[in-house]
Image (cartoon, coloured by chain):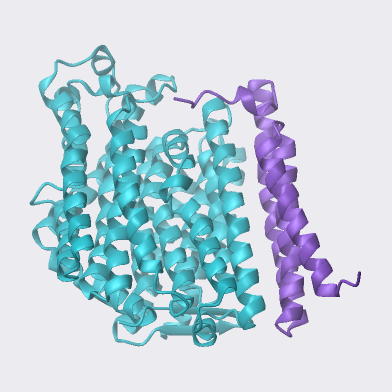
Chain colours: A purple, B cyan
Amino acid sequence: MNLSIPGIIIVAAVALLGIGFYGLLAVRNLIKVIVALQILVKGMMLGFVLAGRLAGNVTLGQSLAIIVIVVDTIVAVVGLALAVQIRQRIGSLDIKTLTSLQR
Amino acid sequence: MNANTALIWLIALPLAAAPLIYLVGRLSLRASNNRRSPVVAWLGVLTLIACGYPLYFAGQAVLAGAPVELAVNAIHLRMDGIGLLLAVVVLLLGAMVMLFSTAYMAGDRGEEKYYALLTAMIGSMIGLGCAADLFNLWVWFEAMAITSYMLVAFYTTHPASLEAGFKYLVQSATGSVFVLLGIVLVFSQTGALDLLEIRNAAHSPDPVLLLAGAAFLIGFGVKSALVPMHTWLPDAHSQAPSGISAMLSGVVIEAGLVALLRALGSLSSVASAWGGLLLSFGAVNMIVGNLMALRQTQVKRLLAYSSLSHMGYMLVGLGAAMAFKVANGAAGGFFHLFTHALMKGLAFLSAGALLYTLHIARGDHDPLTLDDLNGASKRYPLTAFALSIAVLALGGLPPLAGFMSKWQIFVAGAQTQNLWIILLVIFAALNSVLSLGYYAPLVNRMYRKTPSATVENGKPTPKIMAVPIILLTLGVVIFGFAPAWINWLTAPAAASLLAVFGG
């Protein structure tokens, strides 16, 4: 079996997306939800590097991936800060305890 | 001032002012002995008023016919009619919200962060309207989203607002992954990121580009609350501070819509189905928003659900323009975007004024329920009158602004001469009647019921809150009587949309 390099990257990116979506749907811990979001975005970073290669503009693709890292880190920081606040105010990180808005 | 310099100032001013406001706020908090710093709020107001000056010059150039182009290294900005419309609406409503918040947020913990974040959000929305590059569009979009996460979860001591903030963050971040997926697919297929270059490169109905369009629809659809992706909206709108609810409903979801139009516009020649898709989302949004609003007992949740149905009206107008090239549809959709910002801004601000006087000023953080409104007109005649004007305009009563924009959309639908679109317009009109089913009882409660105990015990309204409320009420009435006065703004926006969708 001989996979080309783009082939391997596509498989890896799709696998990361799949793991991320599965995590978002299945996981109940707030911090793990943030981790699942991170895995999703990691898949997309790989996608940018690959897209740069396919479009014949490797440097642009990689620089976009770096910007995605920056933005994504900020989102993770805000998300984790919210998770910490929720742990302090509600006393649990379980998603099932966040029910005050269900109606 | 030269138009390019004006555009730089317009975007840089709020973004540079945001950290400055935070610093000044920290320093003045440290110096003051009662933990208050009124200076931050006025710095925010001042920044937005100062933005009016570059906006005037940039706007003049755009209205003269040529989009203002600007390239700062690899960042490519282009302000056309749509960007100008968004900038005007954002600055207008932003200034009103800032003024309102000077009283509403006074003395809250973290006040300086509130104004810094709000200013940064306004700056990033102006940038979003001007982004000419797909990736750049995403960066502005995320900047707007991140500031709004923090503003929604601003009351960090309340479990409900933390919950709403987290829900909003997870849904919105997942949406942004879809946007990234779309960008990756477009970039790998066309090798271009500039919206015009993509449009020139993407012609054939390539399945990869179709997938990219679908990803954009899902990703930006989360932010603009298209119906299956809307569940964050009522929670976020009802738990955020009232000024932020007005911003979210009045401009943030519309900014998502503008981003969606930009992204789909670059793929306009790949498929002709985009307009039809928006029309069907519009139909679903209207009916779901109205039916959900009917059974709400909290005023802010009710207004949040009605945002869904108003997003539906905009989608009908814009979708008709994209699918059938009727200029009236685009102009009507953008006119509704403008009037919705005024009406929903007014509704949330006056509901916020009532929430403040009835609950927050008395130290409790209960939501404002419909029962609290009973007899509010006896003690708060101005606020009650403004809220009545706002909801009646949202319901589409004739002399008010909401009627005029809906009417223009309905006329555009009839102009398509397509049976399905005419049926859709009738459906939209019936929805408008249905929406009176929850707006009219609000007015009835305020004017005809005997005052509830909550109203009797309410505190007086701070004077400064009345200023934005009166100004927005005047706006809603004036643009109802003279809808043509806003043509200078909506016609160029409609022209830019049709230029992209081949009108």
Asked where in the image residue A30 lies, by quadrant, the reply is top right
State the residue at coordinates (8%, 50%): B398
Q: Position of residue B200 (x, y in %)?
A: 50, 87
Report the side of B114 relative to B473 (left or right).
right
Of residues A12 and B405, the one drawn nearer to the viewer in this rendering: A12
Asked where in the image residue B364 lies, by quadrant, the reply is top left
Q: Position of residue A7 (x, y in %)?
A: 80, 70
- Kindly tell me whether residue B224 is visible in this rendering: yes
Q: Is residue B100 above or below residue B163?
A: below
Of residues A7 and B299, the one drawn nearer to the viewer in this rendering: A7
Q: Quadrant of the N terminus of chain A?
A: bottom right
Q: Position of residue A57 (x, y in %)?
A: 73, 84
Q: Position of residue B58 (x, y in %)?
A: 38, 78
Q: Quadrant of the C terminus of chain A?
A: top left
Q: Is residue B339 above or below residue B37?
A: below
Of residues B223 and A5, the one drawn nearer to the viewer in this rendering: A5
> How many numbered markers are drawn?
0
State the residue at coordinates (69%, 39%): A81
State the residue at coordinates (71%, 35%): A27
Of residues B29 and B234, the one drawn nearer to the viewer in this rendering: B234
State the residue at coordinates (28%, 59%): B316
